[in-house]
Image (spheres, rainbow, N blue to C red):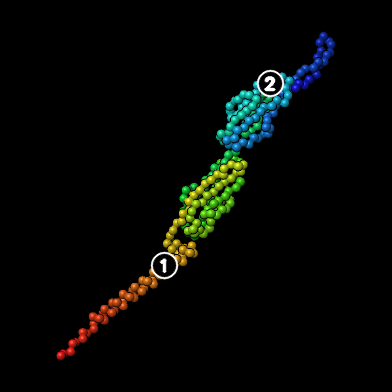
Amino acid sequence: MASEKLQDYTVDGFHATTTATVHTLRIHLEPPGSVLNVLLGQSISLVCMVDYSNTPVTSFNWTHSGRSYSGQTFSKTITSKSDSGNLACTVQNVMVSTRINVWYPPEVHLEPSTDTITVGVGEDLRVQCVVDDASPSVHTFRWSHNGRTSTGSTFLKRNVTKSDQGQLTCTADNGHMMTPGRAAATINMKLDASSLIGNDDSTSKFKVIAIATGSVGLAITIILIILIICQRRKMRTAKPIENPER
């Protein structure tokens, strides 16, 4: 599309008015928008559309991540986080752009950052699920521990018992049908002398019964030994019975 502009000038004393053609060009991207959110691994295709121009458009130039491309359509498979950035189409001296925002699953780890976490019976167990990277941000944390689930970025179990040994897993979800990030650790119990009569009620009862039974058995054995010793002493000190003469 072209617009006309009036211009005044004077030649040999005569005043005249004429019109001058102003070259105009307008373009836009399809799909439109200032930000284009794309899942990692997804393919994109954008078209540089000419709304109007009073001169023929013969070339389209694209720039993305420091590289140049040609053609009216820009197509690309998003294979890396580094594909995030500005995408611009230039026609003649007119430019239109959008920002590619790559979405990818969370990367997480646990703190303490060990494969095995050791905790003493009766102590508190506290583990944090730390997000190293995610786009968009993580909105849900879920924990799984011995068949039980909980939420929140921090797992807290007070006054742990021996039954709390097992696998602890955190999953972090940032939505959009992406695979949640995952991190896991094994929980081990640190046993000491006090755990003989520990916090596990059923285990403590068996231990108490075993100790009591052993003590009673030992006492009976000692008493029997004493009785046997006393009986032998009596037999040694007893006088022999004389046979009568015939």
Amino acid at the residue labelled 1: Ala
User: What secondary structure is found at the residue carrying circle 1?
Assistant: helix
- Residue 5, given in percent of the width and then of the height, sits at 79, 20
Please count the marks in the image.
2
Amino acid at the residue labelled 2: Val
Q: Relative to 105, say whether 94 is above or below.
A: above
- Residue 32, given in percent of the width and then of the height, sits at 68, 32
Pick the front one: 179 or 124: 179
Asked if residue 234 lies left or right of residue 61, the reply is left
Pick the front one: 168 or 130: 168
Residue found at the far bottom of this picture: 246
Question: Taking the image as drawn, is residue 126 in sight?
Answer: no
Asked if residue 209 lies left or right of residue 130, the reply is left
Asked if residue 30 lies left or right of residue 126, the reply is right
Q: Which of the labelled discs sits on residue 82, or is there none?
A: none
Q: Relative to 56, say whether 181 is above or below.
A: below
Q: Which of the labelled discs sits on residue 57, or is there none?
A: 2
Q: Quadrant of the C terminus?
A: bottom left
Q: Quadrant of residue 108?
A: top right
Pick the front one: 176 or 96: 176
Where does label 1 land, which residue? 210
- Residue 239, given in percent of the width and then of the height, sits at 22, 85
The first of marks 1 and 2 along the sequence is 2
Pick the front one: 149 or 81: 149
Task: Estimate how packed mark 1 is, as few (under 14), some (14 to 19) or many (20 or more) residues with alpha carbons within 10 Å.
Answer: few
Q: Quadrant of residue 227?
A: bottom left
Q: Are marks 1 and 2 in contact (CB under 8 Å)?
A: no
- Residue 137, given in percent of the width and then of the height, sits at 60, 43
Residue in the image at 19% along x and 87% along y: 242
Task: Estimate how packed mark 2 is, as few (under 14), some (14 to 19) or many (20 or more) residues with alpha carbons within 10 Å.
Answer: few
Residue in the image at 45% along x and 66% along y: 206
C-alpha span from label 1 to label 2: 95 Å
